[in-house]
Image (tube, helix red, strand yellow):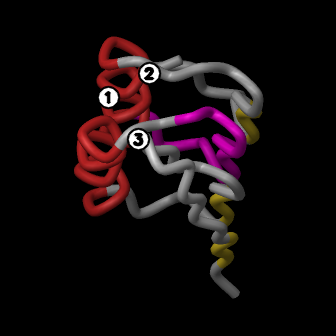
Amino acid sequence: LEVNKTLRELDLSWNGVNYEGSVAIRRVLLVNKTLLELNISNCNIDWINAKIISEGLAKNSTLKRLNVKKFFSSRKNSIFRCSWRTT
């Protein structure tokens, strides 16, 4: 995924994302220059892994749409909903 020249959209929704997964997503966001849309909704990502992914988002300049609906989860079952899109 890092060097894929044709990938424009990646849907990882409804997949549990652990530490290794969040590191892989961060790496894709840092290196891949063709990805325009990323869906990581309903992935039950905790705050530590969310921070890892955010490091990739902060440096990514090509992503146009990010879906993180029901992205976070905690012991108290709090949910964060967000959808982001550039124009």
Q: Position of residue 30 (x, y in %)?
A: 31, 40
- The answer to the question of whether label 3 and label 1 lie on touching residues, with beta carbons closer than 8 A, is yes
Q: Which residue is mark 3?
A: 29
Q: Main secondary structure of the magenta part?
A: loop
Q: Callout 2: helix, strand or loop?
A: loop
Q: Is residue 35 left or right of residue 12?
A: left
As measured in the structure, the alpha-carbon distance from the residue carrying label 2 to the one carrying label 3 is 8 Å
- Position of 18 with respect to 9 (left or right) is left
Instruction: Check if residue 33 falls in the magenta segment.
Output: yes
Mark 1 vs mark 2: give the one in front.
Answer: 1
Q: Residues within 10 Å of mark 2 (few under 14, many from 20)?
A: some
Q: Residues within 10 Å of mark 3 (few under 14, many from 20)?
A: many
Pointer 1 residue: 27
| Residue at the spot 51% in from the left edge and 44% down from the top edge | 73
Q: Quadrant of residue 80?
A: bottom right
Q: Earlier in the sequence, mark 2 or mark 3?
A: 2
Marks 1 & 2, CB-CB < 8 Å contact? yes
Instruction: Please give the residue where the numbered disc 2 appears in the rendered image.
Output: 2
Q: Which residues are magenta?
A: 32-44
Residue positioned 25% across, 49% down in the render: 51
